[in-house]
Image (spheres, helix red, strand yellow):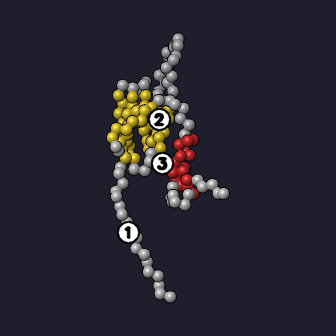
Amino acid sequence: MTKLTLGTHPFLLGFDQLERLVERTAKSGNDGYPPYNIEQTSDRSFRITLAVAGFSEDDISITVEDRQLVIRGRQADDTEGRIFLHRGIAARQFQRSFVLADGVEVGEAAMENGLLHIDLTRKLPDAVVQTIRIKRSAPR
């Protein structure tokens, strides 16, 4: 018996990209920092909130790369001349990625009280009915 994967099932034509997206998401290996929430704000919109205390707007970049929302944080090293008796607040960099479905667009991003909010909207596809004409074959 042959095992069919999602991309090779005969009724799912053109879904091989979906299989690659699932694999890429599984390999992203995010370590849990920074913590985040994803909430649905309406039928067609979502909000991702990341806890980025200690980062300023200038320390964070938000990009969309190959249908992936990528948030990177890097703080400048301002420890020169300072002597820490205890250092419990880590100034580490991070990268957090989210795979976006077709039709999902990134909207505004805002910082508020150490939280980074990124709004996403899902565009509704136009309802299109397409009629395919059948060519007549040449008479034999």
Residue 107 visible in the shown view:
no
x then y, percent, for residue 106: 38, 43
Residue depicted at x 36% and y 30%: 111
Label 1 or label 3, whichever comes before in sequence order: 3
Q: In front: mark 1 or mark 3?
A: 1
Report crowding for label 1: few under 14, some 14 to 19, many 20 or more residues within 10 A (C-alpha).
few
Q: Quadrant of the N terminus?
A: bottom right
Residue that sits furthest to the top in the current view = 85
Alpha carbon distance from label 3 to label 2: 16 Å
Dot 1 and dot 3 residues touching (CB under 8 Å): no
Describe the element under mark 2 as helix, strand or loop.
strand
x then y, percent, for residue 32: 52, 31
What residue is shown with label 1?
131
Alpha carbon distance from label 1 to label 2: 46 Å
Nearest the eye: 61 or 140: 140
Nearest the eye: 46 or 2: 2
Alpha carbon distance from label 1 to label 3: 32 Å
Q: Name the disc covering residue 66, or none.
A: 3
Image-quadrant location for residue 112: top left
Q: Amino acid at mark 2?
A: Arg
Q: Amino acid at mark 3?
A: Asp
Residue depicted at x 53% and y 43%: 25
Report crowding for label 2: few under 14, some 14 to 19, many 20 or more residues within 10 A (C-alpha).
some
Label 3 or label 2, whichever comes before in sequence order: 3
Q: In front: mark 1 or mark 2?
A: 1
What residue is shown with label 2?
72
x then y, percent, for residue 115: 39, 28
Describe the element under mark 3 as helix, strand or loop.
loop
Label 1 or label 2, whichever comes before in sequence order: 2
